[in-house]
C-alpha cells in the first residue's frame, strides 16, 4: 500500500524483498484505536508511522508522487438483498463475508467494515441502510471513526446456489446526506460460485472507489424540493411495495401519503437534487415522472418489481 501510494497509485516496477526485521526498522511508531470485540471477532484501526527517508531509500524514490497523508476513512455497510429481507448483520450474509476478506482499500479512501457488535446493531439495520436513514448512517460512521458511510446493496439474479448475475448499488453518504450513487451489474462466469461472484464484485467496487470516485464530479444533491404526484395502484399490497421501492431511491428524502383510493395513491415526494436527477433515479425502478394538467404522475414503464 505504501509503495503504491508513493508511486502515484500504480505498482512500482520492482519491489524490494524485505524480511520482517527490515520492515520493522522502517516503522517509526503505531497507534491502535477503535478496538471492537465480539464473541468471535476482534477489529481495530491501526495507524503506522513510517520513517519517510528510509522508506524512500528502500523504494528508490527521492520524492513522493502523491501526498503521504493518510486517506480518509469510509464505513462500508454490505447489505445483502435476499427475498424481501435486507441483511446487514444477520447471518448468513455472504456479501458481508466477501467484504471482510477484502483489504481495507488504498489511496484516497480507506474502507472500514464494522464488526457488527451490539453497538453497531443498535446504530443501524439493513432496512435503514437501504432506505438511506440519515441519522442512522451518521451514527454508524461516527461510531467506527469514518468521515463517510457507504451503503453497498447487492442482490443476486437467478438461483441462490448458482446465480446468473449480481446487481449492486453503491451509495455514498457524508453526514448522513447522499453525495454519490453508482450501480454495478455483473454477469456470472460459467460455473462461477456465489462466493466467487461476490468477491469479484467487491474487487470491482474497491477499484471504483479508490480510483474513479475521486476523479468524478459529485452530483449536487444539496438542492432540495418537493412535489405531489399520483401513482396508479392495483391494491393496498401494491402500494406498500411501491412505497418500499420509492424510499430506496437515492434522490428521495421523504414519501408522505396524502390520499389513497383503490386505484390511486396521491403522495408528496421530498427530494434532493434537480427534477432531472429525480427522474433518472426513478427510471432505475421502472417509474417515469411526467407532468400532468395539475399534478405530476408516476407512470410504470415496466412490470412492478417487488423487493
Image (tube, grey):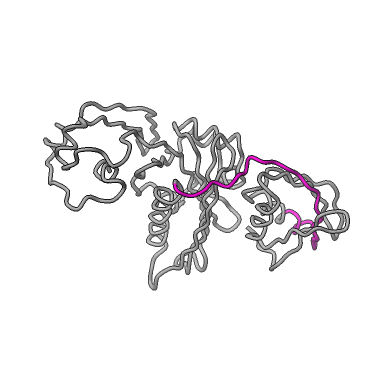
Which is more toward the observer, 139 or 93?
139
- Please check the rendered image and state whether residue 234 is part of the magenta-colored stretch, yes or no: yes
Q: Is residue 50 left or right of residue 189?
A: left
User: Image point 30% across, 26% down: which residue?
Assistant: 31
Quadrant (top left, top right, bottom left, bottom right) of the C terminus: bottom right
Q: Position of residue 113 (x, y in %)?
A: 42, 41
Q: Position of residue 40 (x, y in %)?
A: 36, 39
Q: Is residue 81 left or right of residue 234?
A: left
**What is the quadrant of residue 81 in the picture?**
bottom right
**What is the quadrant of residue 124 in the picture?**
top right
Above or below, 103 against 63 in this view is below
User: Image point 36% across, 38% down: which residue?
Assistant: 41
Q: Position of residue 290 (x, y in %)?
A: 77, 59
Which is more toward the observer, 287 or 157?
287
User: Image point 52% across, 37% down: which residue?
Assistant: 121
Quadrant (top left, top right, bottom left, bottom right) of the N terminus: top left
Above or below, 131 against 135 in this view is below
Which stretch did the figure color magenta?
215-240
User: Image point 45% across, 39% down: which residue?
Assistant: 74
Q: Residue furthest bottom?
A: 190
Amino acid at each position: 500500500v505504501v509503495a503504491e501510494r508513493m508511486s502515484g497509485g500504480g505498482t512500482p516496477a520492482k519491489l524490494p524483498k524485505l524480511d520482517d526485521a527490515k520492515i520493522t526498522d522502517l516503522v517509526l511508531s503505531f497507534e491502535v484505536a477503535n478496538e471492537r470485540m465480539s464473541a468471535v471477532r476482534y477489529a481495530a484501526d491501526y495507524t503506522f508511522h513510517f520513517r519517510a527517508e528510509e522508506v524512500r531509500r528502500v523504494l528508490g524514490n527521492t520524492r513522493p508522487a502523491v501526498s503521504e497523508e493518510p486517506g480518509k476513512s469510509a464505513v462500508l455497510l454490505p447489505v445483502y438483498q435476499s427475498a424481501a429481507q435486507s441483511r446487514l448483520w444477520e447471518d448468513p450474509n455472504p456479501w458481508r463475508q466477501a467484504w471482510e476478506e477484502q483489504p481495507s482499500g488504498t489511496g484516497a479512501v480507506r474502507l472500514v467494515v464494522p464488526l457488527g457488535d451490539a453497538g453497531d446493531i443498535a446504530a443501524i439495520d439493513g432496512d435503514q441502510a437501504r432506505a438511506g436513514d440519515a441519522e442512522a448512517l451518521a451514527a454508524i460512521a461516527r461510531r467506527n471513526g469514518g468521515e463517510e458511510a457507504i451503503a453497498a446493496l447487492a442482490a443476486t439474479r437467478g438461483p441462490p446456489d448458482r446465480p446468473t448475475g449480481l446487481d449492486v448499488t453503491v451509495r455514498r453518504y457524508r453526514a448522513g446526506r447522499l453525495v454519490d450513487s453508482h450501480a454495478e451489474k455483473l454477469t456470472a462466469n460459467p460455473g462461477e460460485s456465489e462466493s466467487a461472484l461476490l468477491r469479484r464484485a467487491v474487487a470491482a467496487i474497491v477499484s471504483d472507489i479508490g480510483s474513479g470516485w475521486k476523479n468524478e464530479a459529485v452530483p449536487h444533491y444539496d438542492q432540495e424540493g418537493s412535489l405531489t404526484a399520483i401513482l396508479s395502484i392495483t391494491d393496498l399490497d401494491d402500494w406498500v411495495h411501491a412505497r418500499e421501492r420509492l424510499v430506496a431511491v437515492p434522490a428521495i428524502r421523504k414519501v408522505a401519503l396524502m390520499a389513497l383510493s383503490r386505484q390511486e395513491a396521491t403522495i408528496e415526494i421530498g427530494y434532493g437534487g434537480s427534477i432531472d436527477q429525480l427522474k433518472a433515479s426513478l427510471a432505475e425502478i421502472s417509474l417515469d415522472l411526467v407532468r400532468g394538467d395539475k399534478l405530476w404522475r408516476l407512470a410504470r414503464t415496466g412490470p412492478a418489481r417487488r423487493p
